[in-house]
Amino acid sequence: MSGKVILHYFNGRGKMESIRWLLTVLEVEFDEHYLTSRDQYLKLLNDGSLLFQQVPLVEIDGMKLVQTKAILYYIAEKYNLHGKDLKERVTINMYSEGLMDLMEMFMMLPFAADPKSKLDSIQSKANERYLPVFEKALTGPLYLVGGKLSLADVLLVECTLMLEEKFPGIMKEFPSVKAFQGRMIRIPAISRFLQPGSKRKPQPDEGYVKTVMEVFNITGPLP
Ligand SMILES: N[C@@H](CCC(=O)N[C@@H](CS)C(=O)NCC(=O)O)C(=O)O
């Protein structure tokens, strides 16, 4: 196993995108092995790389890690983006898991039978359930937890950009979150990541959906 971090996933956002964001902000270099065929997935299964038969898989520090949250928490902990004590850590995890719940709804959209109604539901949940929490937390403070950058901040900037792709005016009612986003995207590593040609993945297209369905033998829309 080489010393470099290796990501095994599709050439698309999905559950790996937040891991790409975190590594990018930390300026940790990584290589990507894209899953493009069912045979590649079966090979990972057969060589025992996938603990629960699922990707994302991240090779790091001599380990083969699966489970997105566990991977994010490991990297955040290793590079000091996971709070200074247990109370900060649990707060970071609460914010992070809320954001992951919201972003997961976007991930499922291209596989849904009725994406329009799902999109409406994402918009109202974002407005009523999620963004008010972050607006309150960021009214005053520059960062979500402990006065310094953490995993939760990285996920929040990713999520706000994702929301604006689908609902361009959504941040109008949330000025503190919008100001936070403005500060975050000026961080040089993030600013580079947002330029064309970076490792940031675009919104899912038909090709991405087709590959995922072939790799996992999915035959119809997901619930
Ligand atoms: N709890 C896991 C879920 C991972 C997951 O659902 N991965 C999908 C691809 S995004 C997968 O491998 N699906 C194949 C399967 O479940 O058989 C995580 O968060 O990493």
Image (cartoon, rainbow, N blue to C red):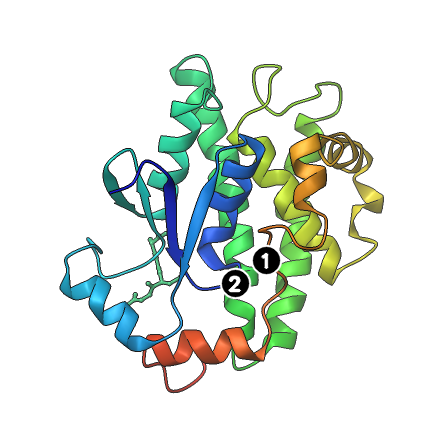
Residue 21, percent from left and from top: 55, 42
Decide: is 94 above or below 209.
above
Separation (CA) of disc 2 from disc 1: 5 Å
Q: Which residue is mark 2?
A: 12
Q: Earlier in the sequence, mark 2 or mark 1?
A: 2
Quadrant in the picture for the N terminus = top left
Q: Which residue is mark 1?
A: 201
Name which residue type carries label 1.
Answer: Lys
Q: Secondary structure at mark 1?
A: loop
- At a point 42% along the width and 73% down the height, the residue shown is 212
- At a point 61% along the width and 25% down the height, the residue shown is 144
Q: Secondary structure at mark 2?
A: loop
- At a point 79% along the width and 38% down the height, the residue shown is 178
Disc number for residue 218: none
Residue 207, percent from left and from top: 54, 78
Q: How many marks?
A: 2
* Mark 2 touches mark 1? (CB < 8 Å): yes
Residue 28, percent from left and from top: 48, 33
Residue 34 in the figure: left or right of residue 145: left
- At a point 67% along the width and 67% down the height, the residue shown is 120
